[in-house]
Image: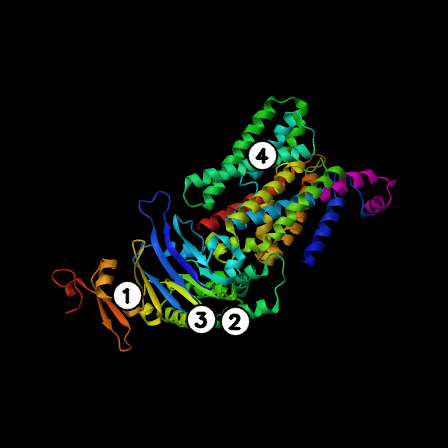
């Protein structure tokens, strides 16, 4: 865990170092200490908030993924694959189109979108089979996510250029909008969710054993699942409202961390938060620099890593 | 500390008949009760009803006179352990970690694992003879070893009552005998054990009481020798059965081959 904290600090530093404008470590150091130094504005008002936001968003997404995997009992579950991200982004797009001010109201609409999506996904999956089949659930998630994206795309097609620019962020994902205000708002809102999940950690250990066993061992399976899904929906919606749809962080990171520190959630969830943050900061650093001065959406980078892993996991879970 | 099912009826939505109909059953500390019956006679349904996992259409399940649904799940789990038949563990753990999960109901969300938690886990590992495997990963275990891990996990919670749904189903002769010996030890230590099994000949030699289920109702209950009569068993299992007394007086049942049956097909003793 100490190692993870060190790695996290190192990646955040690295995230501040790299960017379209080349700055030496020296220059960055002086910029951090002296607001009047050359490049200080870039470092202080662009890079540092961007890195912190990326870290928080990645950590929250990774925790959401780890939680969903436990409550659904399937290592393939993830906010994007379960349609949460798509629903949240549709909610955010709608908020912008009907002219709500950026900030809390967009986050609220995104949350509603994510919740509607997960309820729909559940309904579809439960109708398809009497017992909840995790694979049907994932399929329903992908379908609902695709449906939400299609509606978002349709709305944007008829939107005026200004709205389009503002709303496109939620479709492609990225941290270009990071500012101190956004960072503080996000961290403040996400903290309760993160704490709820850590409070649920031991119940998640039990839920991963299936409902009957979990209940026999003293977890109220239904209540824990509802609370966990509600919390992950809110966390996902918050990340979407500040950074758009970023897939696969919630898949790649928990998988790697379970292998490194084991599947018990009291250790796993904090570890996954740190690792998810680091992973996303790195992905964002790649997104900013790979084709500089053009910027890739960070979701492209996470998908490039995540999709091959998903394919491997899928094969293993079926075989 | 008594777990009591009174006139319990469970009807699955969409099913023609209730899975369990007006079934009554009690379990107290220090006794080994075996529940037996044909496939589909409602054994597993009654088991999950007694653990409060099943909505009831009629009747009630109470622990110390209080309905099971009124107990908080962690408090109930500290008194009554349950081992469902199936379990789909999503992530492999070390055996010792897996057994420690039995302590979560006692520890709550934040309490640190203490020395009494560790000694309960070590005790459960020792009782189930798992100490040599304690550091193995659960995905490398055989079916019998995994079953013992699940039993150890239930024991780590230090329940007063323990319910097991076909604990011996995947076990070979030696492992199943070891399992029943262990259940007997637990009973002597004062735990009340209820086990579902198809192995009536083992049940008769270990159980204090046998409950025979037939199409959702209790067809017979009492001491093994009183319940396991040829006529009742032949009727309930719909196959001619002969019952003989062993040297120690416990009944031993022999399902008959076709060529051993009486011409009228009711057959009660081998020729």
Which label sits on residue A113?
A: 4
- Marks 2 and 1 close (CB-CB < 8 Å): no
A113, above or below B128, in the image: above
Q: Are marks 2 and 3 in contact (CB under 8 Å)?
A: no
Which badge, 2 or 3, is on the more N-terminal residue?
Answer: 2
Q: In the depicted view, which residue is nearer to us: A40 or B209? A: B209
Query: Is A19 placed above or below B44 here?
Result: above
Q: Which residue is mark 2?
A: B123
Query: Is residue A100 positioned above or below B53 on the image?
Result: above
Q: In this rendering, do the residues under marks 3 and 4 share a single chain?
A: no
Image quarter of the N terminus of chain A: bottom right
Expressed as whole percent of the image width and height from the top left, the position of residue A300 reads 61, 39
Q: Residues within 10 Å of mark 3 (few under 14, many from 20)?
A: many
For the residues bearing labels 3 and 4, Cβ distance under 8 angstroms:
no
Magenta residue span: A27-52
* Same-subunit check for callouts 2 and 1: yes
Q: CA distance from mark 1 to mark 4?
A: 60 Å
Mark earlier in primary sequence (2, 1):
2
Secondary structure under the numbered disc 1 in the rendered image: helix
The x and y percentages for residue B265 are 15, 60
Residue at x-position 53% and y-position 41%: A82
User: Which residue is the site of mark 3?
Assistant: B186
Is label 4 on the same chain as label 2?
no
């Amino acid at each position: 865990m100490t190692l993870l904290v060190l790695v996290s600090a190192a990646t955040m530093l690295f995230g501040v170092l790299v960017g379209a404008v080349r700055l030496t470590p020296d220059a960055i150091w002086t910029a951090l200490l002296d607001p009047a130094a050359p490049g200080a504005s870039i470092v202080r008002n662009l890079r540092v908030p961007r890195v912190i936001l990326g870290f928080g968003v990645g950590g929250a997404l990774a925790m959401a993924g780890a939680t969903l995997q436990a409550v659904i009992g399937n290592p393939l579950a993830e906010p994007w694959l379960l349609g949460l991200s798509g629903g949240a982004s549709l909610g955010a797009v709608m908020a912008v189109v009907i002219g709500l001010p950026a900030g809390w109201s967009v986050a609220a609409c995104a949350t509603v979108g994510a919740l509607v999506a997960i309820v729909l996904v559940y309904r579809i999956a439960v109708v398809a089979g009497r017992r909840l089949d995790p694979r049907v659930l994932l399929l329903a998630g992908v379908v609902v996510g695709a449906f939400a994206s299609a509606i978002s795309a349709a709305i944007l097609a008829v939107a005026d250029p200004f709205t389009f620019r503002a709303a496109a962020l939620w479709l492609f994902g990225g941290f270009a909008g990071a500012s101190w205000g956004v960072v503080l708002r996000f961290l403040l809102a996400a903290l309760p969710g993160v704490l709820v999940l850590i409070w649920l950690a031991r119940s998640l250990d039990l839920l991963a054993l299936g409902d009957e066993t979990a209940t026999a061992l003293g977890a109220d399976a239904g209540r824990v699942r509802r609370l966990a899904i509600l919390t992950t929906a809110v966390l996902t919606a918050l990340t979407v409202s500040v950074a758009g749809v970023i897939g696969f962080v919630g898949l790649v990171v928990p998988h790697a961390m379970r292998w490194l520190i084991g599947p018990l959630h009291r250790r796993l969830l904090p570890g996954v938060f740190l690792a998810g943050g680091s992973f996303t900061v790195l992905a964002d650093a790649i997104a900013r620099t790979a084709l500089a001065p053009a910027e890739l959406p960070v979701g492209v980078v996470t998908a490039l890593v995540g999709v091959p892993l998903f394919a491997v996991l899928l094969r293993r879970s079926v075989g | 500390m008594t777990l009591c099912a009174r006139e319990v009826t469970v009807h699955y939505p969409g099913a023609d008949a209730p899975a369990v109909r007006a079934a009554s059953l009690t379990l107290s500390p220090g006794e080994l009760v075996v529940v037996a019956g044909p496939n589909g006679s409602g054994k597993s349904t009654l088991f999950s009803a007694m653990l409060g996992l099943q909505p009831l259409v009629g009747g009630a399940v109470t622990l110390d006179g209080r309905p099971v649904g009124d107990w908080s799940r962690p408090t109930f789990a500290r008194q009554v352990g349950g081992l469902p038949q199936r379990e789909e563990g999503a992530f492999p753990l070390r055996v010792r970690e897996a057994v420690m999960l039995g302590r979560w109901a006692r520890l709550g969300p934040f309490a640190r694992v203490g020395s009494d938690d560790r000694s309960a886990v070590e005790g459960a590992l020792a009782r189930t003879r798992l100490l040599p495997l304690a550091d193995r990963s659960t995905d490398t275990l055989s079916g019998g070893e995994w079953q013992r891990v699940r039993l150890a996990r239930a024991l780590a919670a230090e329940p007063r009552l323990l319910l097991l749904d076909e604990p011996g189903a995947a076990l070979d002769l030696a492992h199943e005998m070891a399992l029943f010996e262990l259940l007997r030890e637990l009973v002597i230590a004062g735990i009340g054990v209820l086990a579902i099994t198809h192995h009536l000949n083992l049940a008769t030699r270990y159980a204090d009481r046998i409950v025979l289920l037939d199409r959702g109702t209790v067809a017979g209950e009492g001491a093994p020798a009183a319940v396991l009569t040829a006529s009742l068993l032949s009727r309930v299992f719909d196959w001619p059965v002969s019952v003989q007394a062993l040297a120690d007086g416990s009944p031993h049942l022999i399902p008959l081959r076709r060529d051993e049956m009486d011409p009228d097909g009711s057959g009660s003793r081998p020729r």
